Image (cartoon, helix red, strand yellow):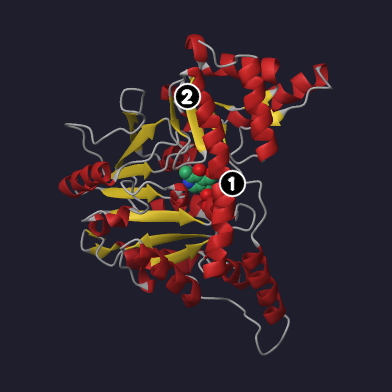
Amino acid sequence: MKINKCYRNIEDSYLFSTISKKVSEYKEKNPQADIIRLGIGDVTRPLCPVVTEAMHRAVDEMSKIETFHGYGPEQGYKFLRDAICKNYKELGVDINSGEVFISDGAKSDVGNILDLFDKENTVLIPNPVYPVYVDTNVMDGRKIIYLDANEENKFLPMPPNGIRADIIYICSPNNPTGAAYSKIQLKKWVDYALDSKAIILYDAAYEAFIEDDNLARSIFQIDGADKCAIEICSFSKTAGFTGTRCGYTVISDELKFDGMSINKMWLRRQSTKFNGVSYVVQRGAEAVFKEEGRLQVMESINYYKENAKIISDLMKNFGTWFTGGKNSPYIWFKCPSGMKSWAYFDYLLEKTNIVGTPGIGFGENGEGFFRLSAFGSRENIIKATERIKSLKALAQ
Ligand code: PLP
């Protein structure tokens, strides 16, 4: 029996374990400290009433012989896929329900989609990055080319001259940087992918935070994207489904490589290795698109957005260089006085009892940067900004 040796090449992920170790040690020495956690990317607000009501009704259906549901379609129930198509239509994107695949979340699809692609492919990944893109490719032994995201390109790198890759990752609005591509910028990526016969894996997990019209909510708003891109989306950040688990992936019927339909390949893959998302959860997800559901979901999104605005206003006051804060729940900023990411983590923890995420944890280009999340409570965000202000913890 031979193991997949590529697993030897995966770096241990110390980021969140180191953060919790440091926080525990600090708490032990300073038991009175009132720690505010602005490091996590998890939501804190509950599912909205329309969603839980729909789920309650679905549970009741499951309890009666006439309305019980066993295995569902692997691709997802049509009622949910139709609701997703309708939602895309409002963005000006025409897709049919056969192009939508329901999953238990974006993370699974981001990893599993690689089943369709040869391990000899070269992958283009921006740095800093959501670590799942890197680790899933290292597990398969693919060659990775990193693309510099930095202060100069405002953490929105454009297609590199003279470099070609087969698989391109784009996450917009981005985790960790909060930066989001404009439609004009994305058109350049689509043209680059079409020219080089590459595929774009577009992670739109944070699309619901976009408010500016010049930014894309979906890569399919860009001409030609149906022929080169797969879009992966999630209810996690849109509707607080991080613990409920539901997402979807859109693959156009037009997407073909080597004469093979990627849509058909994914359907074959999913119906072989996946048995669908529970009926109850899919009914909950469907409710997100109902009129009342949209309003209730937007209430939570607007709450997080207001949090993000409070933090980004603070950055503006201090003259701190940052990305995100608008069209995104993340604020990514330059550590003051040229401090390195972990040094600033310690400084912020000790001086203000605030926990954030060191940028270096997302790749070497994150060194000297720091991520704060707006997913906390308003009370904590206000308390945190007041502490930073009074202790001048962002002063250069
Ligand atoms: N993609 C990005 C960029 C994320 O930041 C996350 C979660 O934080 C995910 C995907 C995972 O989403 P899901 O909860 O749907 O698996």
Report which quarter residue 296 is drawn in: bottom right
Q: Can residue 14 be seen in this view?
A: no
Q: Residue furthest bottom?
A: 66
Q: Position of residue 248 (x, y in %)?
A: 46, 61
Q: Position of residue 260 (x, y in %)?
A: 25, 64
Q: Can residue 289 be seen in this view?
A: yes
- Report the side of 171 relative to 28 (left or right): left
Would you call the spot at circle 1 few (<14 residues within 10 Å), some (14-19), or many (20 or more)? some
Q: What kind of element bears circle 1?
A: helix
The residue pinned by badge 1 equals 303
- Report the side of 265 relative to 319 (left or right): left
Q: Position of residue 227 (x, y in %)?
A: 23, 58
Label 2 or label 1, whichever comes before in sequence order: 1
The residue pinned by badge 2 equals 316
- The residue located at (67%, 21%) in the rendering is 387
Would you call the spot at circle 2 few (<14 residues within 10 Å), some (14-19), or many (20 or more)? few
Tell me the amino acid under the disc marked 1: Tyr
